[in-house]
Image (cartoon, rainbow, N blue to C red):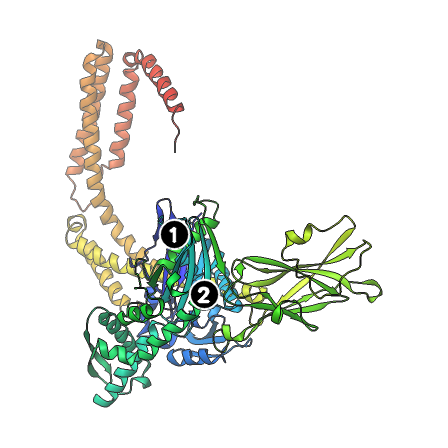
């Protein structure tokens, strides 16, 4: 089993893994700690991760990136439309209102949902982890932004299931960062909580978490975010600046060219990193478009002026998180700044103005989420022993339930799970109903959600059930806000109360907060009858859709493997041609006849020409056949070469054995000694005769003395000699036997690990 944490960012992914010595980050095939969150479709196969990023510039319209921004979102959301304008691939609205991505693959137009693309990314990360750990990977913890809605969380679970993963928890990025920070620190005061703010400026978003730490315990006090403010927005400031400059200076419009836009954005991102450590930086791109080389230059202070609005926006979620936590800046002990977009120097000054603290950078900015997720996975997994540490997270939204009769909770605004409520959490509603009814889950405060996101969550049908005389009966409904932050109607049951007291007419028993609290008040006269519950999620996947997506992913994976096998077979054939040609001129030269050399050389040349012309794009079977045909011609020559080496070794072994047995014969009685000496003489005579025959042949002829024949002769000779010498060695058997017994006893006392 394995213990893995995945941080799937908008731009890069990191895989954390728990090992006996602690938490580590897995390297990908390119020995990098970060893997690009990119899926690119070639003509016959997919390129995912680093290979996908390498294909992005050459094939932008079939390269999918920033899928994290699209998963679980509706096509018509204003924020989605804004993102899609920056992405080069074609999209449309799906039947469920979601996003369909269109591209060319296998010579036909194909469409994929954002869940399917995310599943491909998960499958690739799973593959990297399995290759590194040399074991199957299934259980994991996946980091998600705190602002993810119920549908986005479900979409992550769908994608993980398609990829063959089993998430033990979807964990908020900030909570994962705080866990990794808090569990290893030993200097927290025992006199009271230590309050720490974590500001995570990622590629596309900003998340702020206020956490309270005590020895052995961590509690999240508040989450705040800006889902549309991240490092890429600062890149975009530079992109617009230089795009305008190049329009004026070189008369080129990069907006009109997808490839040019991609290259300029990549250059601006590098420029931003240079400005984080230098007061000024140049920009040079060869053949950006219209065969024109472009040059630019910017100072850090000019960049900060261009980004002043963005820097000011950073303070909004910071102030909100501080307000929601109920703390003031003087009660904040530490401020930690993380995330790939946090390296801009001006950001530290802005945060200092809000929290009155100099931001610390003691945490690995890019790996903290993956490490925290891996740590949480170890805590949830039975195979690791982790010291007791309580993690209490808070939910960033308030959730209510309503039926056709109105809100089903007596709390204000129909809220069942208020904002900041700890989770997982289970609540029990007690309702009076006479027939099947519906419960709708919704976010009670639209302002807490990212802009344009619907407040609807899901709709559950409870029933059918039968009540005699159309009376209202007591229905208990268990509602869970689970470890992933997903709200579901867990179960419902009909309570047949045969006691004398009358039932309340209230819609909900607000005192029944959980199952245990409710069950303690049951008497023997109460009977329970389970009621079926069916759930409908707007934009969710059905079991059939999930099964079809899994089948499609298997087909795509098989095609990728098939193409890779074909490439390997082609490369093997090509390498064999070059290696054999070289050997034919050197090591194999004296072992081949003139006609063999001519025939092999001719076939090698024909194969090489075929590889670069008609055979450039053939099947695995064709390459295998070509290789087999070549080997049939080369094998006799190769066997002669190898046989000479093997024959020399076999000869050495035989002659050594003869010398050893002749020396050993000196200690034998006369009759046995004479027999052994005779056997040595016979073996020598046999070898001498055979050697003369072999030496008379040229090296390019098949041998008459084979190494296998010499080995058989050696074995027969040694068996005969041992048989003759058995009387001499028999007295040692007792000693050997007692030695064997001694070893057995010794071995019995050793535990083999």
Q: What is the C-alpha distance between the residues marked 1 and 2?
A: 26 Å
Please, what secondary structure does the residue beneath circle 1 have?
strand
Q: How many labels does the image show?
A: 2
In percent of width and height, residue 312 lies at 35, 76
Dot 1: within a 10 Å radius of its alpha carbon, few (fewer than 14), some, or many (20 or more) residues?
A: many
Q: Is residue 92 shown to the viewer in this render?
A: yes
Badge 1 is on which residue?
17
For residue 223, which numbered disc appears in the image? 2
Looking at the image, is 82 positioned above or below residue 341? below
In percent of width and height, residue 653 lies at 21, 30
| Left or right relative to 122: residue 232 | left
In percent of width and height, residue 714 lies at 25, 28
Nearer to us of marks 1 and 2 is: 2
Please, what secondary structure does the residue beneath circle 2 have?
strand
Q: Is residue 619 shown to the viewer in this render?
A: no
Dot 2: within a 10 Å radius of its alpha carbon, few (fewer than 14), some, or many (20 or more) residues?
A: many
The mark nearer the N terminus, 1 or 2, is: 1
């Amino acid at each position: 089993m394995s213990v893995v944490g995945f941080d799937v960012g908008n731009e890069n992914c990191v895989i954390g893994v728990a090992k006996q010595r602690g938490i580590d980050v897995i390297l990908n095939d390119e020995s990098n700690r970060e893997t690009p969150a990119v899926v690119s479709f070639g003509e016959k196969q997919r390129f995912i991760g680093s290979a996908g990023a390498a294909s992005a510039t050459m094939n932008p319209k079939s390269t999918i990136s920033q899928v994290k921004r699209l998963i679980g979102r509706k096509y018509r959301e204003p924020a989605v439309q804004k993102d899609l304008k920056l992405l080069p691939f074609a999209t449309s609205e799906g039947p469920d209102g979601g996003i369909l991505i269109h591209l060319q693959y296998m010579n036909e137009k194909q469409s994929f949902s954002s869940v399917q693309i995310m599943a491909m990314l998960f499958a690739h990360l799973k593959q990297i982890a399995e290759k590194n750990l040399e074991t199957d990977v299934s259980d994991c913890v996946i980091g998600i932004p705190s602002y993810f809605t119920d549908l986005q969380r479900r979409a992550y679970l769908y994608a993980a299931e398609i990829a063959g993963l089993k998430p033990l928890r979807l964990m908020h990025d900030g909570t994962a960062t705080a866990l990794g920070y808090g569990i290893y620190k030993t200097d927290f005061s025992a006199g009271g909580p230590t309050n720490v703010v974590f500001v995570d400026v990622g590629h596309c978003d900003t998340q702020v978490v206020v956490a309270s730490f005590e020895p052995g315990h961590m509690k999240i006090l508040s989450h705040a975010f800006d889902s549309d403010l991240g490092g890429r927005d600062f890149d975009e400031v530079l992109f617009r600046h230089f795009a305008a400059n190049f329009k004026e200076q070189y008369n080129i419009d990069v907006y009109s060219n997808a490839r040019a836009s991609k290259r300029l954005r990549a250059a601006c991102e590098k420029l931003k990193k240079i400005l984080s450590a230098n007061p000024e930086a140049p920009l040079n791109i060869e053949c950006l478009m219209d065969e024109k080389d472009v040059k630019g230059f910017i100072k850090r202070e000019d960049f900060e002026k261009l980004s002043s609005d963005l820097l000011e926006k950073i303070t909004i979620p910071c102030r909100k998180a501080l307000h929601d936590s109920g703390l003031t800046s003087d009660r904040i002990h530490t401020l930690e700044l993380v995330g790939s977009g946090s390296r801009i120097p001006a950001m530290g000054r802005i945060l200092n103005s809000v929290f009155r603290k100099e931001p610390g950078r003691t945490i690995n900015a890019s790996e903290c989420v993956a490490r925290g997720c891996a740590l949480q996975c170890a805590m949830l997994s039975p195979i690791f022993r982790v010291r007791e540490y309580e993690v209490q997270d808070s939910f960033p939204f308030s959730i209510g339930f309503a039926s056709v009769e109105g809100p089903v909770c007596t709390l204000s605004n129909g809220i069942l799970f208020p904002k900041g409520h700890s989770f997982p959490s289970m609540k029990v509603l007690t309702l009076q109903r006479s027939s099947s009814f519906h419960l709708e889950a919704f976010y009670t405060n639209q302002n807490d959600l990212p802009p344009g996101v619907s407040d609807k969550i899901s709709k559950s049908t409870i029933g059918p059930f039968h009540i005699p005389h159309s009376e209202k009966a007591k229905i208990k409904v268990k509602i869970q806000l689970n470890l992933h932050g997903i709200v579901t109607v867990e179960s419902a049951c009909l309570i047949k109360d045969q006691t004398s007291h009358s039932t309340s007419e209230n819609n909900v028993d607000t005192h029944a907060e959980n199952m245990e609290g409710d069950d303690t008040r049951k008497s023997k006269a109460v009977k329970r009858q389970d009621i079926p519950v069916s759930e409908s999620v707007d934009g969710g996947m059905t079991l059939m859709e999930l099964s079809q997506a899994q089948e499609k992913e298997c087909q795509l994976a098989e095609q990728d493997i098939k193409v890779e096998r074909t490439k390997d077979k082609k490369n093997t054939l090509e390498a064999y041609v070059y290696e054999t040609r070289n050997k034919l001129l050197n090591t194999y030269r004296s072992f081949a006849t003139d006609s063999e050399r001519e025939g092999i050389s001719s076939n090698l040349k024909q194969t090489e020409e075929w590889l670069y012309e008609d055979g450039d794009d053939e099947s695995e079977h064709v390459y295998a056949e070509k290789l087999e045909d070549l080997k049939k011609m080369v094998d006799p020559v190769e066997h002669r070469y190898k046989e000479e080496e093997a024959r020399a070794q076999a000869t050495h072994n035989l002659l050594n054995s003869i010398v050893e047995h002749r020396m050993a014969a000196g200690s034998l009685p006369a009759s046995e000694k004479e027999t052994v000496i005779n056997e040595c003489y016979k073996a020598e005579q046999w070898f001498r005769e055979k050697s003369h025959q072999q030496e008379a042949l040229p090296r390019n002829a098949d041998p008459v003395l084979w190494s296998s024949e010499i080995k058989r002769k050696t074995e027969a000779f040694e068996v005969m000699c041992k048989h003759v010498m058995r009387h001499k060695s028999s007295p040692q058997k007792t000693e050997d036997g007692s030695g064997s017994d001694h070893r057995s006893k010794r071995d019995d006392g050793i535990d083999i690990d």
